[in-house]
Image: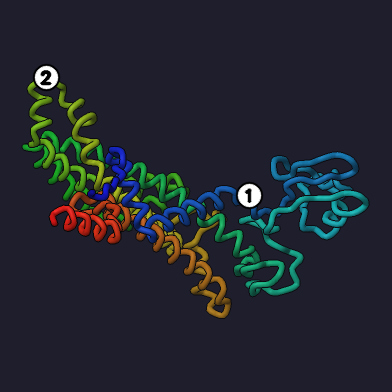
Amino acid sequence: MFASTSVKIDAVVTPRQRAWRRFKRSRLGYWSFVAFCTMLLVSLCAEVLSNDKPLLLRYEGQYYFPLLKNYPEKTFGGDFETPADYLDPFIHQRITSDGNWAVFPLNHYGARTINYYSTAPDPAPPSADNWLGTDDRGRDLLAQLLYGFRVSALFAIALTAIGVVLGVLIGAVQGFFAGKVDLWGQRLLEIWSSMPELFLLIILSAIFQPSVGLLLIILSIFGWMGMSDYVRAEFLRNRQLDYVKSARALGVSNWQIMWRHILPNSMTPVVTFLPFRMSAAIASLVALDFLGLGVPPGTPSLGELLNQGKNNLDAWWIGVFTFALMVITLLLLTLMGDALRDALDPRKVHSEIVPKVPRSNNSNASAETKGAAA
């Protein structure tokens, strides 16, 4: 008698599920994605984790929420109507004694907080009070890195989103209609890409007041061209396939063919391009901030911290910790991009794991076969 073996066959999965499985198989890429999302989530909660205001305090039987509302100093026994400084030893003693209590964040400093009561000269090295030290203005370095990473990450996400929208729209029109539309579009792109982006940024920064919005608009003007090249190539290839010809024969409009049929089949280079575009956006913002052409003064900036590290070589902690955060961020995005490229590349062969039949069963089956034959 032959030994029977059963092989479990997986249910049919969609291409998205298959790509997600392939992405998870790349441990470096998957855990880089998890780590970057965790860093972004922590930075979005920066006010709760690093702030010079208590999250909640109870003073003389009443509850206050300083993180949500500014209270005058007189509320806690001070002499002025100005907003309370909770780092002031007098105010701190008033809100934490005689049955009063306050819940402070893990780090007692915000992005713009200057500790005027510190006894160490600035920039101060890492200590129990300032875990990563302070910069040359007396601001807590940990708070600067936390808030600065959020500014850089959100800026990169916004710049990437705008670049994807413009790049997909322009590249799709060029690739689908081809012919003279593509010819004239390419000539205009060549002229536009030859414009000196840095010089244009310097001129506009001198005319207008520097702001994150202005910087986002200027970089978005040039940031879509790389994406449009990928989308254009995909549309030029897919417009000749049979399903597009069938849709045209059925009378489907050009715009429906573009957005409902060709675009979903051309998203592989778009998705693969996203992490690399984000890393380029972060590097651009840091470089501009380093040169003094980026975000307005007072905004948490990794580029400004790198500039401080260059100007204060004896304060090693400023340059080392900022550079380490930059390297980790760009490395995580690069590993994510490599994993996405491998997961979505149709030329990559990912063999499924097929359960093997135990050797003991094969030997028993062969013995029974020989006995039956005899």
Q: Position of residue 89 (x, y in %)?
A: 83, 60
Q: In which quarter of the view is residue 359 placed?
A: bottom left
Q: Position of residue 280 (x, y in %)?
A: 35, 57
User: In the picture, which quadrant includes the C terminus?
Assistant: bottom left
Give the residue type that dot 1 points to: Glu
Q: Position of residue 214 (x, y in %)?
A: 42, 46
Category of crowding for the residue at label 1, using alpha-carbon neighbours closer than 10 angstroms: few (below 14), some (14–19), many (at least 20) = many
The residue tagged with tag 2: helix, strand or loop?
Answer: loop
Of the two numbered discs 2 and 1 on the same chain, state the one appearing first in sequence: 1
The residue tagged with tag 1: helix, strand or loop?
Answer: helix
Foreground pick, 34 / 97: 34
Kindly give the residue lying farthest to the bottom in the view shown: 314
Give the residue type that dot 2 points to: Gly
- Is 369 placed left or right of 92 in the picture? left
- Is 131 placed left or right of 20 in the picture? right
Q: Residue at x 15, y 41 (%)?
A: 185
Q: CA distance from mark 2 to mark 1?
A: 56 Å
Mark 1 — residue? Answer: 47
The dot on residue 251 is 2
Kindly give the residue lying farthest to the top in the view shown: 251
Kindly give the residue lying farthest to the right in the view shown: 98
